[in-house]
Image (cartoon, helix red, strand yellow):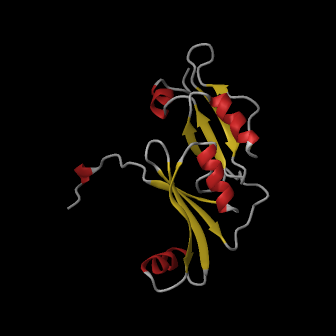
Amino acid sequence: MTTKHSVYPRTFSHIGISVPDLEKAVKFYTEVLGWYLIMEPTEIVEDASAIGEMCTDVFGANWKKFRIAHMSTGDRVGVELFEFINQENPENNFEYWKTGIFHFCVQDPDVEGLAEKIVAAGGKKRMQEPRYYYPGEKPYRMIYMEDPFGNILEIYSHSYELIYSSGAYTG
């Protein structure tokens, strides 16, 4: 039974990311971000199996097939990498003004080092240099990047709670 007093913060389970090449994405996310591969790339087909019917519920009829790999971050958040047969690379993958998720963020104390690893692996910087939230005061910094497939990711040097608990925009 749910009551109005049972509201509590849910934990984050996983995120799904669409990529054009599943093997290259698995290589990037394991070698550059250090995520764990917990289920090898697998083909899922449109059929009467439990997973087939579940996907039809989500995608509608005639999705035919896709490939998926399951990964996990160091703090146990799941990442599903999807390679769809009709996958498209939008010319502009940063339409931040449109409803929907426009980035995900990872945390690494070596923001600059991880940014360079991402560039070396075929990604790119969306900002030239990391920005400080409290210049000259605290070492909290961030940078926006793209993975090699055009997905937008951000890197934080410190935890979300540390950065925003001090009122990052109010100083």
Furthest toward the top, the residue is 136
User: Left of 122 or right of it: where is 141?
Assistant: left
Q: Which residue appears at 67% of the width and 52% of the height?
A: 151
Furthest toward the left, the residue is 1
Furthest toward the right, the residue is 91
Q: Which residue appears at 56% of the width and 32% of the height?
A: 108
Q: Quadrant of the C terminus?
A: top right
Q: Position of residue 54 (x, y in %)?
A: 46, 76
Q: Position of residue 66 (x, y in %)?
A: 60, 73
Give the quarter of the image for residue 32. Answer: top right
Q: Quadrant of the N terminus?
A: bottom left
Q: Position of residue 98 (x, y in %)?
A: 65, 56
Determine if residue 116 is in view: yes
Decide: is 47 above or below 36. below
Decide: is 115 above or below 171. below
Count the numbered circles shown: 0
Pick the residue in front: 39 or 167. 39
User: Left of 66 or right of it: where is 3?
Assistant: left
Give the quarter of the image for residue 85. Answer: bottom right
Give the quarter of the image for residue 149. Answer: bottom right
Pick the residue in front: 24 or 51. 24
Q: Which residue appears at 51% of the width and 28% of the height?
A: 163
Pick the residue in front: 131 or 111. 111
Q: Which residue appears at 49% of the width and 34% of the height?
A: 160
Determine if residue 125 is in view: no
Q: Position of residue 110 (x, y in %)?
A: 61, 28
